């Protein structure tokens, strides 16, 4: 039996047992198998006799944050919680090393090139999840492990195209439903007709006829998984904030239906932007700035 004391730091054994159980559930979820998380929490609480169900659930939410920081999608239904110890990162890294089958599943699912069928957006949230503001902090804290699977999914052209087509269909259906048929006919998938340089994917209209520039970000995973934006998208949102809309599609294609939330206006105001990479080129240096042995070399 693994013992611990309530109110005291988690022991290595408690952390390891919780991480292992999280990975059991995550593996089942990635395979599309049914699981009842509450029952698993109770089972683990019976082993960790001084850790109740609530504390176990919170620790598993910390594990979700570590995974997102490492570039992995987290277990659905366990939103990331920051403020975790470094020892938890090491435990998750060790489990990832042992469970190579998870990488194999993610590699297949997130890079699949087969066309994705039409998806109806059935659910819309009124506001974006507040937890998103914590996730960039998580990504900054955790070191890169193997592959950034969230970036890999974002680069999946088949998934991105399917999300954009779903939004085109949604915008057309909405405008038809309010009697604005001519506007519906003018909805345009500009990412296909004009290319990617505009900084948005779909041209639509609001009921008054004003343009809506819609950038679509699609994930098969949870509502609180971060997304990636380009410099061009940020620039377009700042140039015309009154027209710019970002549609975040989550749970794309899931049996429960695809969800959607919207961000409007300047992305620098609606999002916490974290520069994960930079475009770089060597600076031009004068002779006075060169090392002495380089400064005296003759031109060849």
Image (cartoon, helix red, strand yellow):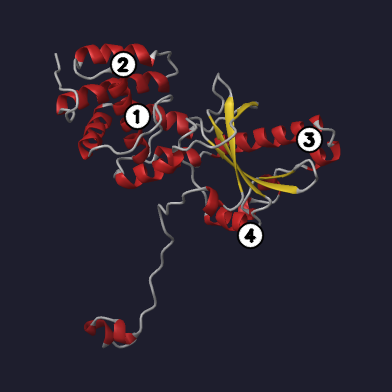
For mark 1, give the secondary structure.
helix
Image marks 4 and 3: residues in contact by CB distance under 8 Å: no
Q: Label 4, label 2: how many angstroms apart (C-alpha)?
A: 49 Å
Name the residue located 27 percent from the left edge and 37 percent from the top edge.
84
Query: In this view, which residue lies farthest toward the front?
Result: 7
Disc 2 marks which residue? 41
As drawn, the label of residue 175 is 3
Q: Residues within 10 Å of mark 2 (few under 14, many from 20)?
A: many
For mark 4, give the secondary structure.
helix
Q: Label 1, label 2: how many angstroms apart (C-alpha)?
A: 12 Å
Q: Residues within 10 Å of mark 3 (few under 14, many from 20)?
A: many
Disc 1 marks which residue? 61
Q: Label 4, label 3: how many angstroms apart (C-alpha)?
A: 26 Å
Disc 4 marks which residue? 239
> Which of 154 and 224 lies nearest the eye of the viewer?
224
**Comes first in the chain, label 1 or label 3:** 1
């Amino acid at each position: 039996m693994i013992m611990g004391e309530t109110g005291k730091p988690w022991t290595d054994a408690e952390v390891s047992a919780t991480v292992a159980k999280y990975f059991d559930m995550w593996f089942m979820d990635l395979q599309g198998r049914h699981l009842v998380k509450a029952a698993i929490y109770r089972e683990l609480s019976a082993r960790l006799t001084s850790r109740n169900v609530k504390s176990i659930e919170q620790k598993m939410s910390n594990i979700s944050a570590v995974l997102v920081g490492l570039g992995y999608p987290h277990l659905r239904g366990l939103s990331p919680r920051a403020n975790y110890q470094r020892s938890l990162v090491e435990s998750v890294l060790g489990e990832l090393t042992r469970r190579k089958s998870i990488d194999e599943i993610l590699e297949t699912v997130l890079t699949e090139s087969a066309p994705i069928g039409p998806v109806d957006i059935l659910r819309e949230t009124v506001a974006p999840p507040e937890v998103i503001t914590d996730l960039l902090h998580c990504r900054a804290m955790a070191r890169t492990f193997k592959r950034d699977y969230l970036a890999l999914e974002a680069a999946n052209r088949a998934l991105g195209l399917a999300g954009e087509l779903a939004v085109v269909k949604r915008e057309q259906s909405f405008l038809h439903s309010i009697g604005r048929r001519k506007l519906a006919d003018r909805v345009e998938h500009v990412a296909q007709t004009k290319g990617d340089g505009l900084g948005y994917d779909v041209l639509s209209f609001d009921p008054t006829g004003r343009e809506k520039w819609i950038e679509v970000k699609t994930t098969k995973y949870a509502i609180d998984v971060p997304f990636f934006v380009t410099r061009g998208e940020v620039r377009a949102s700042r140039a015309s904030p009154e027209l710019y809309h970002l549609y975040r599609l989550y749970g794309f294609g899931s049996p429960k239906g695809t969800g959607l939330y919207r961000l409007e206006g300047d992305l620098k105001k609606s999002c916490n932007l974290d520069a994960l990479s930079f475009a770089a080129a060597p600076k031009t240096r004068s002779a006075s700035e060169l090392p002495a042995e380089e400064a005296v070399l003759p031109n060849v």
